[in-house]
Amino acid sequence: MNEQDEVIHRTWVQLLLDSEQKEAAAIALDIEINIIEEDYKRNVGDRVSVQFHIPTAVYGYVKSNEQLKAIFEETAKELLFGRKLSFPHYDNEGVWYEREIRVSQLIFVYFVKFILVEDGWKDTIKALIASSKGVNNQGATSELMFARDKKDLISHNGLKFASQSEVRIAQELMQRKVLFFPLAVGVRAETGQQYKDHCEVDFLVCVNGVWGILEVSGPSHNGRLAQDTEKDRWLKKSGILCIEHRTAEQCYANPKKVTDEFLSILAQYKK
């Protein structure tokens, strides 16, 4: 991205965040934006193409999510429509100059963001393919719930997450080199009924032999106090006593603070 595109990208992400579109802002953060002038060869027109270059991990999710694309495009229009932008060109004699236009029409294009080639990338892909063979219990319950709503879980670092808020917590735990299991499915065969014998947690964390659970409560948890309380009781029955709940907004806005607080509380359970 050039300097103008970087300024637009930074402002666009902030606009999404300030418009309470936190999930969209989290995805937009990793998108690369290129603003291309259309019809410049004819030296007419004031139409620009807004190119969203989307990471492979979320490209399928963005492409199939019409609501998310509508949010992206509407906020981009609010930011760019009627604004003067500069575009560099060479004239017929090869002299560099900048042409300024006032935007009156926007075209939106979605691309897969290219991945830089790193050493040993083929071995990395082979390992990912090998680890993905067979049944994967990670995120099994959330995957069923998302499938019911015709949505996909978010993929990050080869793992599944139910929200960008969870992704941010995972990134914090990875930076601290803490052992954790995201969307882990626990089983205790007591009743023979799967919905009673299975339990999925957002983050199962182990530090120095002490186990704890961090739950990220989103809008879907509203009015579910009784179910969450029963879930906590089910887990505590097996000896996991440190179970902390934080809202998705808290985890998204300040994942470092949430993670620090959780690890501090977990440390108090060490015998």
Image (cartoon, rainbow, N blue to C red):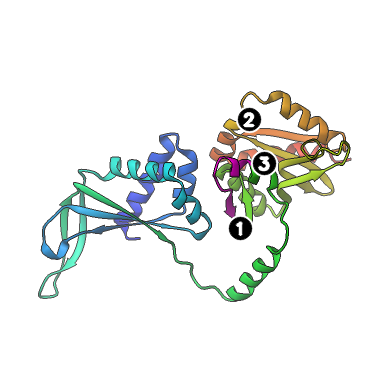
- Residue 172 shown left or right of residue 11 in the figure: right
Q: Give the residue type at disc 3.
A: Asp
- Residue 224 shown left or right of residue 75 in the figure: right
Please say if 123 is above or below 230. below
Which residue is tagged 1? 157
Secondary element at tag 1 = loop
In the rendered image, residue 74 lying in the magenta stretch gets the answer no
In the rendered image, residue 147 lying in the magenta stretch gets the answer yes
Nearer the N terminus, badge 1 or badge 3? 1
Residue 138, horizontal then vertical, whole percent = 70, 51
> Which stretch appears magenta?
145-157
What is the C-alpha distance between the residues marked 2 and 3? 23 Å
What is the C-alpha distance between the residues marked 2 and 1? 26 Å
Secondary element at tag 2 = helix
Which residue is tagged 2? 221
- The answer to which quarter of the image holds residue 92 is bottom left
